[in-house]
Image: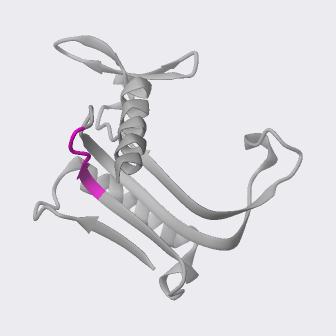
Amino acid sequence: MLDIINNKTNEKSTEYDAARIIYEKIDEELPSLQTKKDLFVKIFVECKCHGELPQDLDIVIIGNLKDWNFTVDPRFLKSSLNSFTCENFVLTVEVKAHPQEKIRFQSGVAEVYYQNSGWHNATEQSDGQARSLKNYFKKK
């Protein structure tokens, strides 16, 4: 099963648009996921982790792909193997709507440009969302 969970009635947000793109890419790569009852990917839009900073998470993706075998281009792995299985995963996605000229990558850090404050570390912001979710789950 592949679903987008959006608790807001507004489907016009940048986060929702990004979730739709993610959904379409997953559906394109794993079309049989729609019919498998024991496997799932849930895409949550604009989540809250009350009591954490940051508390607002753009997108959270949670999945169970029990014993699904993936093949990956070896250039992207630090191993000579190019296939692996993924059982469970959780990840956060920081959404940015900046034009390409206002995004840069320096020494492994993604930065975005804001008119009023200059360059902003988006990697740090993304890492903060992942920490918030991890800490939130630890408390539950």
Q: Quadrant of the N terminus?
A: bottom left
Q: Magenta stretch: give its range.
A: 45-51
Q: Which quadrant of the rendered structure holds the C terminus?
A: bottom left
Q: Tell me if residue 76 is in the magenta stretch.
A: no
- The quarter of the picture where residue 97 lies is top left
Camera-nearest residue between 53 and 29: 53
Q: Is residue 129 above or below residue 12?
A: above
* Label total for image: 0
In the image: residue 67, left or right of residue 23: right
The answer to whether 47 appears left or right of 20 in the picture is: left
- Residue 6 in the image: state x and y as whole percent: 22, 64
- In this rendered view, identify the residue nearer to me: 110 or 43: 43
- Give the x, y percent position of residue 109: 50, 21
The picture quadrant where one finds residue 51 is: top left
Identified at 17% across, 64% down, the residue is 7
- Residue 61 at x, y percent in the picture: 42, 57
- In the displayed image of the protein, which residue is found farthest to the right? 80
Residue for point 32% across, 31% down? 99
Rendered position, 59 above or below 98: below
Residue visible at 50% across and 65% down? 63
The front one of 37 and 18 is 37
**Residue 50 on the magenta segment:** yes
Q: Position of residue 90 (x, y in %)?
A: 48, 54
- In the picture as drawn, the residue positioned furthest to the front comes out as 139
Left or right of residue 1, residue 20 in this image = left
